[in-house]
């Protein structure tokens, strides 16, 4: 078996229950984002752009769409011989089988995959975060520090630090203490849930963790504290760019809006580190004679006859004559019929808002409509 | 469907020097923003279940092979069958006449002989339409004709389209150039593979001829049935027919006819983000591809990917190809701007509805 320097394990099994109807029938990493992407495009593109060609994707919750979307990985140039994308769902063995019981357990159950690829380093990623990062830089930092584990961290506003897992470090970036949601934070460096382990240590630690009856088999809750207690060399890798974990409806909408405006917080128009996706082939977007579209992202295949502002329209979205759409995210195939009004809302795949119907308001919480549902006039 | 392979011929370019860049085969010309003309015959074949397609190349084939790659986007990158890039014999690219040159087929006889499929569907890469080719093949098998060809009553004169003279659905003769009301040949036909191989033997001495022409005029004439098509189609041979075929797609009914929801037109995909309509922009009656950034005014136009229309720029009734930048205050009207052109601030480029202005490809 050929030796790989670094293999990525992408945790994509989560339900994302706080995303409500958006994840009622797909896993969170498969949720559409930014008009033409799905969330998992971001970590997969990061891998491809960082030269990591071997990625195990750990799936569990409603995996069908995710599996078919990832396919052979060719959309991210990850259809490599002797590597590429491997989809790793829970499986049975001669002694039975079990669901993934935690982030660390998911990797433990796939130690066979890791051993087969025999990497020097293992990159642990989350499939539900939006950011652009060159993992090669992080790996270099890991090597320079001669670290056992490197944790990517980002500075967060001090007043929000108590919402995160916070790393307290010395001047060299060596982690002294890890505190989950501290009441009185001593640092504002939050863990991003992105880890590079030296492979031998990871395997040994996971094998020990697996038989520890007191462990909940979680990287943040169990593995990091154990390595710290054992005096291992844990370092931070500081990341300053845009990073979001879209855990809730409001953060999903907020992060979507970060793509808009004249100077978007998250710039997806760059050729240097492209976000790749398994995109559909649709004709260009069609604008009717009375269309009014400002501050919007519009994917191919959309048809717009009405007025749309500050919104994101995925492929095959239809906005009828006289319809008004404001501050909304319309997922593929959503249909706003003539004269309907949609404000401050997220509409799932193929949602129909019937002619003349009204949905949402800027004064209320963001309205959400699940895939395929119909909003009728007067409801 | 019966087992069928496809052959697409791409050896045709425009007679007009200013129409896009000289020497680019029409097959590789961008159409409706994100497509190339060849996507339409390719998709018709693939949507009908054909998984073995040979594409006969013109001399200047770089842009075509770049676009087609290994055929992945058309499900043609496969173990058995798939996409075959075939050499053409013509030195250069034809500017008149023949689409299905016999010597091009003789040169590639091996592909036809190695196949075990019963039928061969041919298309040129100049006429765009979206049809279910199974209907053509089924009608062909049911009729017992030697060849069955897609035809349509011409809406207008076109010097480059082949006209058929037919009686009771059987072709009696052909000529280059069709007049309004005559029967136009849509450059798409089906023939039994074994008969095709025989024809290549019979006509070998006249290999400079078009296969259809030879079938009508040499030896015992073959029976060529017509198969009427009544959907949208556009013949793209020159600047004005190209311009009109693009502008047709700004009519929602014609757009729906060329892009029906059940038969997607497949093309090479790119990793471009969605288009961004900035505050202060205005886009009406237009088609805008992914990756565009619109700050100015666009009306009645077709934009390929990654076009930038700066604040204060005005684009009307025009076609802007990939990567074009229209700088602040520039005005572009009734024009075809080929890829990567930067139109400087304040420039005015105006053509007319009868004779649009065409600006050739800029360097990458």
Image (spheres, coloured by chain):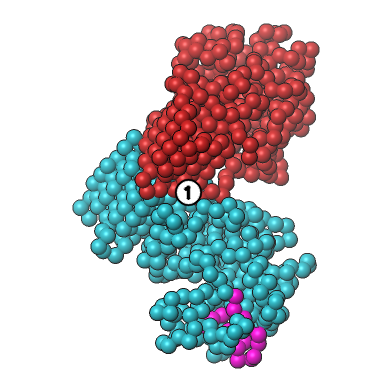
Chain colours: A cyan, B red
What residue does disc 1 label? B274
Residue A180 at x, y = what percent?
48, 84
Query: The numbered mark 1 sits on a residue in which chain?
Result: B
Q: Nearer the viewer, residue A84 or A252?
A: A252
Q: Is residue B131 visible?
A: no
Q: Which residues are magenta?
A: A219-237
Q: Is residue A258 visible?
A: yes
Q: Is residue A131 left or right of residue A354?
A: right
Q: Where is residue B296, by image quadrant?
A: top left
Residue A261 at x, y = what percent?
40, 55
Q: Is residue B332 left or right of residue B84?
A: left
Residue A328 at x, y = what percent?
35, 55
Does residue A228 show up magenta in the picture?
A: yes
Residue A22 at x, y = what percent?
40, 61
Residue A131, relative to residue A206: is it above or below? above
Q: Nearer the viewer, residue A10 or B81?
A: A10
Q: Residue at x 31, y 53 (%)?
A: A326
Q: Residue at x 72, y 71 (%)?
A: A119
User: Which quadrant of the figure contains the C terminus of chain A?
Assistant: bottom left
Which element is circle 1 on? Answer: loop
Q: Residue at x 62, y 78 (%)?
A: A150
Q: Where is residue A87, by image quadrant?
A: bottom right
User: Which quadrant of the figure contains the N terminus of chain A?
Assistant: bottom right
Q: Residue at x 54, y 75 (%)?
A: A153
Mark 1, Cα crowd under 10 Å, few <14 / some 14-19 / many 20+, is many
Figure disc tally: 1
Identity of the residue furthest to the front in this view: B346
Residue A277, relative to residue A130: is it above or below? above
Does residue B332 show up magenta in the picture?
A: no
Residue A39, relative to residue A295: is it above or below? below
């Amino acid at each position: 078996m050929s030796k790989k320097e670094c293999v990525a394990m992408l945790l994509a099994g989560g339900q994302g229950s706080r995303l409500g109807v958006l994840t009622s029938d797909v896993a969170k990493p498969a949720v559409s984002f930014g008009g033409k992407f799905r969330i998992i495009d971001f970590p997969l593109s990061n891998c491809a752009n960082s030269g990591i060609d071997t990625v195990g994707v750990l799936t569990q919750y409603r995996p069908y769409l995710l599996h078919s979307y990832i396919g052979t990985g060719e959309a991210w140039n990850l259809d490599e011989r002797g590597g590429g994308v491997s989809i790793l769902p829970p499986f049975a063995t001669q002694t039975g089988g079990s669901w993934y019981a935690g982030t660390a357990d998911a990797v433990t159950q796939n130690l066979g995959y890791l051993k087969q690829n025999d990497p020097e380093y293992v990159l642990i990623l989350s499939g539900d975060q939006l950011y652009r990062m060159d993992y090669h830089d992080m790996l270099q930092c890991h090597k320079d520090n001669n670290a056992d584990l490197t944790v990517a961290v980002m500075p967060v506003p001090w007043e929000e630090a108590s919402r995160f897992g916070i790393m307290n470090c010395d001047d060299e970036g060596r982690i002294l203490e890890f505190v989950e949601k501290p009441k009185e934070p001593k640092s504002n460096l939050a863990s991003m849930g992105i880890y590079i382990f030296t492979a031998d240590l990871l395997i040994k630690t996971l094998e020990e963790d697996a038989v520890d009856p007191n462990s909940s088999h979680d990287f943040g809750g169990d593995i990091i504290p154990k390595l710290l207690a054992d005096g291992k060399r844990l370092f931070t890798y500081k990341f300053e760019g845009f990073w979001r974990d879209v855990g809730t409806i409001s953060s999903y909408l907020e992060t979507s809006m970060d793509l808009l405006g004249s100077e978007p917080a998250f710039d997806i128009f760059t050729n240097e580190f492209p976000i790749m996706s398994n995109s559909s082939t649709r004709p260009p977007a069609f604008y009717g004679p009375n269309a009014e579209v400002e501050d919007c992202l519009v994917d191919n295949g959309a048809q717009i006859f009405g007025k749309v502002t500050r919104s994101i329209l995925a492929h095959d979205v239809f906005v009828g004559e006289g319809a008004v759409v404001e501050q909304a995210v319309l997922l593929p195939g959503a249909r706003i019929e003539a004269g309907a009004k949609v404000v401050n809302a997220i509409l799932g795949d193929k949602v129909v808002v019937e002619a003349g119907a009204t949905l949402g308001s800027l004064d209320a919480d963001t309205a959400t409509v699940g895939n395929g549902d119909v909003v009728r006039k007067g409801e | 469907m019966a087992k069928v392979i496809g052959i697409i011929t791409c050896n045709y370019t425009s007679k007009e020097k200013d129409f896009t860049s000289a020497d680019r085969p029409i097959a590789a010309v961008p159409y409706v923003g994100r497509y190339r003309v060849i996507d339409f015959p390719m998709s018709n074949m693939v949507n009908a279940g054909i998984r073995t397609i040979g594409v006969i190349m013109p001399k200047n084939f770089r842009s075509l092979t770049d676009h087609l790659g290994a055929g992945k986007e058309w499900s043609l990158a496969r173990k058995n069958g798939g996409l075959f890039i075939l050499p053409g014999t013509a030195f250069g690219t034809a500017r008149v006449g023949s689409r299905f040159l016999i010597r091009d087929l003789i040169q590639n006889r091996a592909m036809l002989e190695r196949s075990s499929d019963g039928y061969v569907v041919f298309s040129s890469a100049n006429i765009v339409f979206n049809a279910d080719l199974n209907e053509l093949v089924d009608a062909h098998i049911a009729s017992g004709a030697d060849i069955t060809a897609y035809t349509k009553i011409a809406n207008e004169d076109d010097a480059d389209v082949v006209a058929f003279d037919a009686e009771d659905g059987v072709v009696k003769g052909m000529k280059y150039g069709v007049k309004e009301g005559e029967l136009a040949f849509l450059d798409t036909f089906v023939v039994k593979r074994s008969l095709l191989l025989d024809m290549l033997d019979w006509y070998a001495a006249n290999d400079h001829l078009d296969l259809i022409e030879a079938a009508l005029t040499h030896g015992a004439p073959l029976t060529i049935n017509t198969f009427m098509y009544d959907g949208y189609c556009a013949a793209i041979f020159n600047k004005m027919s190209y311009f009109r075929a693009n502008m047709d797609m700004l009519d929602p009914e014609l757009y729906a006819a060329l892009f029906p929801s059940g038969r997607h037109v497949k093309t090479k995909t790119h990793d471009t983000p969605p288009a961004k309509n900035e505050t202060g922009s205005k886009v009406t009656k237009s088609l805008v591809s992914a990756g565009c950034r619109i700050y100015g005014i666009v009306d009645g136009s077709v934009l390929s990917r990654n076009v930038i229309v700066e604040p204060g720029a005005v684009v009307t009734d025009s076609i802007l190809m990939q990567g074009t930048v229209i700088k602040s205050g520039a005005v572009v009207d009734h024009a075809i701007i080929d890829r990567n052109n930067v139109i400087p601030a304040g420039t005015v480029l105006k053509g007319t509805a009868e004779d649009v202005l065409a600006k050739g490809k800029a360097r990458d």
